[in-house]
Amino acid sequence: MRTVSQVVEGVIHRSPFLAEAMAEGLSNNAQIARRIKPEVEKILLEEVSEGSIAMALHRISKDSKIIPYGTRFLKQMSDITVRSNLVQFVFPNSADLSGVLGKVSRIAKNKKGVFLNFSRGLYESLLVVSKEIEEEVVHSFENQKYLKLIVGLSAIKMRLPEQSLNVPGLYYPILKAIAEDGISLVEVMSIGTEFSTIFADKDIDRAFSAIKRITS
């Protein structure tokens, strides 16, 4: 049978927001206890006083330093690269889209160092490529209507540790750092351990500085 302390610790370590609030002293134990009380009671299937939850929070904060979610993995990340001179195409999904993408992939494969990133949604797909193959992509999609073309983009690509993939809130510190600096994201793309953020060229230096601040 789990104790109040065990349940409280589990709730805190599942939430990047609460872990961050405790780590930075942004909220006192009574406030957090009031907020998580319904969840703690739901897990334990019994009523629990705010005082006992606050006491458990006090023990957690004294026993070990609470590190906001994802931060320890971000500190292990050494592979961060910037790619400039990119363009983005947005297409409506269609039956022949996969064949056209195969053609674009072969074009990129035959040109060393070309950037290519593709993401498919329910209704639309987007393709981010190096500007040097823009004309070839347009030619490949000549029978495919594209909804939008955005030029003047750059990407920050991050290679995350394999063991971080199941960590909740992993991207939270990255996106928070970008938002706190008032930087607009054009796109976010994730493939396994690779996490890419796309920005307008004018924002790339500030975005890179924000990400380095939390990974160094």
Image (tube, grey):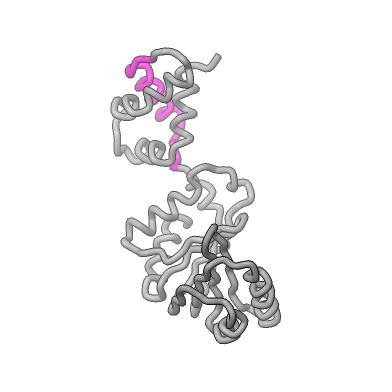
Counting labels gives 0
Percent across and percent down for residue 15 are 44, 37
Type of secondary structure dominating the magenta stretch: helix
Find out whether residue 76 is within the magenta segment: no
Examine the rendered structure and indicate whether residue 31 appears above or below residue 69. Answer: above
In the rendered view, would you say 128 is above or below 187?
A: below
In the rendered image, the quadrant that contains the N terminus is top right
Residue 159, given in percent of the width and then of the height, sits at 58, 59
Residue drawn where x is 40% and y is 65% of the image: 207
The residue located at (43%, 79%) in the rendering is 152
On screen, residue 158 above or below 49: below
118 up-or-down from 173: above or below: below
Q: Identify which residue is drawn at 61% across, 55% down.
A: 193
Q: Residue at x 49, y 69 (%)?
A: 155
Using the image as rendered, state which of residue 151 and residue 178 is in the foreground: 151
Q: Magenta span has 55?
A: yes
Name the quadrant containing residue 143. Answer: bottom right
In this rendering, position of residue 115 left or right of residue 63: right
User: What is the span of residues highlighted in magenta in the rendered image?
Assistant: 48-68
- Decide which of 58, 187 is in the foreground and name it: 187
Image position, residue 11 (x, y; %): 45, 30
Q: Is residue 183 left or right of residue 197?
A: left
